[in-house]
Amino acid sequence: QKTQKAEEMRVLVTGGAGYIGSHVIYALQQTRRYKVISADNYHNSFPGSLTRVAQIAQDTLPENPSEADKESTEIDVFQCDLTNSEQIKGIFERYGKGGIWGVVHIAAYKAVGESVEIPLTYYANNVAATVSLLQTMSDFDCTRIVYSSSATVYGTPPVIPIPETTRLKADSPYGKTKVMSEMVIDDLCHAEPNRWRAISLRYFNPAGAHPSGLIGEDPRGRPGNLLPLLAHMAIGRVDAATLQVFGNDYPTPDGTCVRDYLHVLDLASGHLLALDALAPESAIFDNCPDDARYKAYNLGKGKGMSVLQIVEAMRKATGFDFKYEVIGRRRGDVPDLTADPALAERELGFKAPQPLEVMCRDLWNWQSMNPQGYTQQ
Ligand code: WQD
């Protein structure tokens, strides 16, 4: 059990208002061990999500909440663009040297197709901003980071399920920004092994929402990802009544792409385990080569589901009769991204037990309670 007060364990979550960020902040607050700071530019998120997260924290307070309990429901919120180093510095100055215990760096642009069209924007926002963040962290003696990476770093992997030892070979500028940021952090940990501790979490496909229905995935504009798109179709939010399936000629059981979907709350719990692993007493880095305290872990269930299986699961969860037409493949898609989750399970104690049915049920509950998402606020 941690002895330090929540006040001393401040964690900055970049992208804190986003789909993943809001669920990670929820999980951090549930531990009552961290004081949360959110930095987000709301490019693909809404500040209203943080109000909802605070409401969940309030709703889950015990009968006679202690000071620590009450503190844990507060979030220091900053609207900040990570490409603006002055804005990042302003946040760290607020808490002083050593004032922020660690950073969970989630903020990034993440649309594969878009990254092909505007690569410079992706390199500036995902790589240059990460370098700038790390420089500011170093200046303020904040040398612990959990980095949000992605299964796209594997490109088309040679083996399925995918172990972390797989060579990194991203195909899209987006995936390359994730590989490059991992390398930046890895090199920094090699350069200053006694200062830095870092973990990259390679997300597979997060899905679902907090069961309260108060927070969920709410991308600006038409969703690019399959599950939020299906939820929008079922709630009547997108014009197209027919799903376009991007190819059914892949070398997979039903010809459509296979992905490893995990519940967003299981993904969030993986971030807590990673933060624990960055604590001084953690032994996770004991046998690291040349003492660099850097590791990367897959966060997935280790269970692949095809596009058509997802459509069927959402048909069951929503009662909506989805129509689909198969069209050509989408650029950047790979046949199968299924994780080998053994390393995270063994070393972090990570588990992603929630089944697809629960992911679809929670996604539909969120969408039904918020047909227009957060834009109501
Ligand atoms: C899933 C499957 C599509 C929409 C992306 C990013 C990845 C990560 C998660 C950030 C694919 C198919 C989709 C549609 C379809 N983001 N599909 N019709 O591509 O696995 O991963 O989001 O880290 O980096 O690449 O997720 O939900 O977009 O697609 O047939 O209208 O559904 O081809 O096979 P993806 P997705």
Image (cartoon, rainbow, N blue to C red):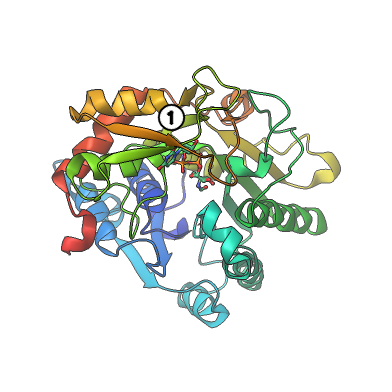
Closest to the observer: 121 or 130? 121
The residue under the point 26% across, 52% down is: 53
Residue 279: x %, y % from top left: 59, 45
Indicate the quadrant containing the C terminus: top left, top right, bottom left or bottom right.
bottom left
Secondary element type, mark 1: helix
Whether ligand 1 has any atom under 8 Å from the Cβ at mark 1 is answered as yes
Quadrant occupied by the N terminus:
top left
Q: Position of residue 17 (x, y in %)?
A: 36, 59
Q: Is residue 76 visible?
A: yes
Q: Residue at x 63, y 46 (%)?
A: 199
**Residue at mark 1:** 307
Question: How far across and down, in percent of the image, does residue 31 sit?
Answer: 37, 42
Q: Is residue 171 left or right of residue 258?
A: right
Q: In the image, what residue occupies the spot 43% across and 29% down?
A: 307
Which residue is most to the top? Answer: 253
Total numbered circles: 1
| Image quadrant assignment for residue 128 | bottom right
Q: Position of residue 26 (x, y in %)?
A: 33, 47
Residue 299 quadrant: top right
Is 364 in front, or is 264? 364
On the image, which quarter does residue 139 sit in? bottom right
- Give the residue type at disc 1: Val
